[in-house]
Image (cartoon, rainbow, N blue to C red):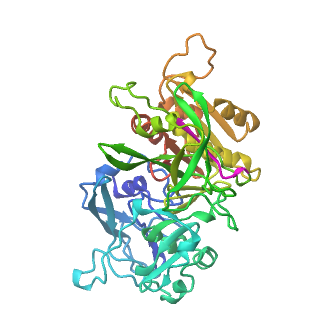
Amino acid sequence: MTTQQLVARLGFRRGVAHHDLRWPVLNDHWFERSGPCKNFAGTKRWKFLNTKEICLRAVDSSNNHQPEHPNWNVTGMLNNCWYRVQVEVLSRPNHGPRMTFHHPVRPGELGGGWMVTKDKEPKPERTAVGDAWRPICEEELAKHTGPKDAWVAIDGMVYDLSDYLEDHPGGPAPILAYAGKDSTEAFNSVHVDPDAREGRSMFCIGMLVSQNLNRPRGDHEFLLKPGHWEEVELAKKEIETLNTRRFTFRPLKQGLKVGLPVGNHLLIGANFTDDNTTHLVSRPYSPVRPVRTDEDDGTFDLVVKIYFAGESPAFPQGGKMSQHLESLKVGDKVLVKGPDGHVLYKGCGRFTIGGVTIATKRVALIAGGTGLTPMVQLIRSALSDKSDETKLSLLYSNRTVDDILMRNELDQMAAENPDRFTVWYTVSTDPEGKEWKFSVGHVDEELMHEHLFSPPDASTIAFLCGPPAMIDLAAIPGMEKLGYVLDVNMFEF
């Protein structure tokens, strides 16, 4: 494979400008979809774990590759068309290896790069906060306004720019003027070039929870308070399937809104006593209601599969939390905390995923079992907004026909929105004696190709949620063969 082919297969972000040339900027988020090379499926990340350097060719401001062979002309700036990126592999406990790509130098007046000697390097590279993202309310944001504690909000995400103040080309003053505030309008009015946004995610510490459509600004008091457990009581329990229930919980205080952004989940907690020791156990759940602000009356619905003891040899004791929820009677109480999650849907095809804003027109969804619940949030939110033209296609897998959750609601949404939403079911057990026009079998590449958006274009993304075996062994490999790339245009809830 030639170096040019390697560049094309890797794909890259819009690079940092240096005179009129750009160096493709690599990082371990693996390249935004807006980059000039989109057809890079097939290159596996693990292949670079033992790679020390990658040789790349620069592109100009129009994303044209520079000459493969160096040459000189009277209009040239003697820029080097080729450069080397060094690969550093960092180990992360419980998260596997992380690859960091070091360029020869950093853009503009920023120090660093592998060409800079150790004694001249001003400060070590900052590492991304990754799993430390969390919901941050406006009240908390407003407390961080000092030069050693400068937080700003941009596009619904919160950034701690304290370590960046001295490196900012315009000096600390422009940042400090907006510390503790939402600076989206000011930032976007100045930084129109995508290159100016490079590296912003490295400073992301959380999401501004009140910026989502489902958590509007105003005088509302919310049930969910980031970082705090609140008590709620069971208002109603309904049987969805043989082993699945719909629980409706309500706050103890009247007049509250739930305040859950679309795409987020919450934690349910309960105290258990084992061997005379009491400890808190919590599990994440995605409510299927409320989704729209006009239906947020403070109550929320969870659809939960009950893992009964003795049903599975692998888990003879069953699910601790799900069995606890099954035992609840109306009026019994549990704890709730949130919102949490890395996906935010802002409406009209706009997502914020891990701090990166993505605009899309088509969304492919693959769900298995109760992995349907975050999909229902997204589908209901998009379809309830008549100005939202996003098209959605759902492939939903279950063991039996009777295991299918919320089928009536899914079928109704598809019937009422035939141009915007389609759903296709597949079950692994043959539904003998039952009328069935859908598929029998597991999720595979053929089903994904036939019932989802294949191949994906630049305005298509996919979300996956379900049992790990289905996601890791079927959904991800199959979608990659269709042209989707994990963490680029394909994401897990």
Residue 127 relative to residue 463: left or right: left
Q: Is residue 159 above or below residue 447?
A: below
- Tell me the residue at 45%/81% (across/down): 149
Tell me where the magenta segment starts and ends, as one range: 295-304
* Residue 263 x %, y %: 57, 51
> Which residue is most to the top?
433
- Tell me the residue at 36%/44% (across/down): 273
- Tell me the residue at 40%/55% (across/down): 10
Pick the residue in front: 349 or 250: 250
Residue 415 relative to residue 29: left or right: right
Q: Is residue 292 above or below residue 197?
A: above
- Tell me the residue at 45%/62% (across/down): 133
**Observer able to see residue 119:** yes
Pick the residue in front: 87 or 342: 342
**Observer able to see residue 364:** no
Q: Is residue 58 above or below residue 187?
A: above
* Residue 84 x %, y %: 31, 68
Number of numbered markers: 0
* Residue 376 x %, y %: 61, 42
Residue 322 counted in the magenta span: no
* Residue 277 x %, y %: 32, 48
Q: Quadrant of residue 189?
A: bottom right
Pick the residue in front: 227 or 374: 227
> Which residue is most to the front?
276
